[in-house]
Image (cartoon, rainbow, N blue to C red):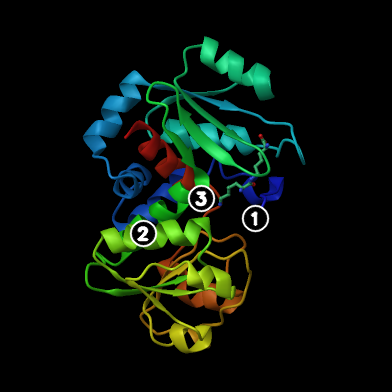
Amino acid sequence: MTRLVENDIAGLERELDVYEEELLKKTGLNLSEVACAGGNITIHDLRKAAQSYRVAVVPITSGEGVIGGFTQFVASIIRKMGFQATVTEETDVAGFYEGVCQENEIIFMADDKKFIALNLRTKKVIDNGYGTGRGFGAALAGMADGLAGREVLVIGFGPVGSSAAEYLLESGAKVAVYDQNELRMKETKKDMKQEPNLKKALKIYDFLIDATPEGEFISPEDLTDQAMIAAPGIPLGLNAPAFEKYRDRVIHDPLQIGVATMLALAVG
Ligand code: 2YG
């Protein structure tokens, strides 16, 4: 799991509207709609939840400590979905206490190992990796105008890749998986195809999920002309010329889709 740095999220809060316009252009869906698709809830249910839940985001100082702008950006993504969200004054346990006492029933918090959304009313706890995988699966489906019956290659079968693959199977897609780690490949489900050779596979599949922490390992000549890529992996797996060529069919962000889908799953 890649740990974000301040620079990965600097300035993104004020660009959230532009980000959402681009998402809408590429997928036909806004952030809440992608989140609802990935979270298996209706927009109506999300709107209702926004009237009944308030959200607190708690800064956590353990491990490598607070990432500048992280909790503020998380809160702004949640507000973009129509919810009231605040970053607590206090950090850690004191912050959690403050958030609960202010009657927030959804708590977002992240240390260096786990980033979670906790629903205090239903006791549901959602992991970022799970939400991110499902959200990017839903975004790819939006870009492709549905993936039922289509072949999708998932690169990287960690928490994000495996949940993306789960979402794609639920959507009726034919899922193939590549992971450089043989043990991970063994974890693929029986109805998933294993692709042992990445370069060969990239030449076959038009629909890709890049769920690896590797950067710049994909060049333009590796991809099909029709390729569409949803890339939750940080840093981006496409190198600069590949991103330039395919940018209108690439979805990549450090937090937006993952946080939005965590919220939809947490209130679902
Ligand atoms: O409260 C804070 O500011 C810090 N304790 C947050 C630490 C977050 C560490 N985790 C990550 O940076 C990522 N795993 C977050 C998810 C990225 C998903 N693309």
- In this rendering, which labeled residue sits more in front, label 1 or label 2? 2
The number of discs equals 3
Pointer 3 residue Cβ closer than 8 Å to ligand 1: yes
- Residue furthest top as drawn: 101
Compared with 243, 69 (above or below) is: above
Give the Cα distance between marks 1 and 2. Answer: 21 Å
Residue 2 marker: 1
Dividing the image into four quarters, tell me where ligand 1 lies.
Answer: top right
Indicate left or right for 254 with 194 as reference.
right
Q: Quadrant of the C terminus?
A: top left
Amino acid tagged 3: Gly
Residue 248 visible? The answer is yes
Which quarter of the figure has residue 238? bottom right
Up the image or down, 147 lies above or below 151; here it is above
Residue 205 picture location, percent across and down:
38, 81
- Residue 89 visible in the displayed image: no
Please give the residue where the numbered disc 3 appears in the rendered image: 129
Query: Could you say which disc has been placed on residue 260 in the image?
Result: none
In the rendered structure, find residue 166 and report the number of the disc placed on it: 2
**Disc 2 CB within 8 Å of nearest ligand 1 atom:** no
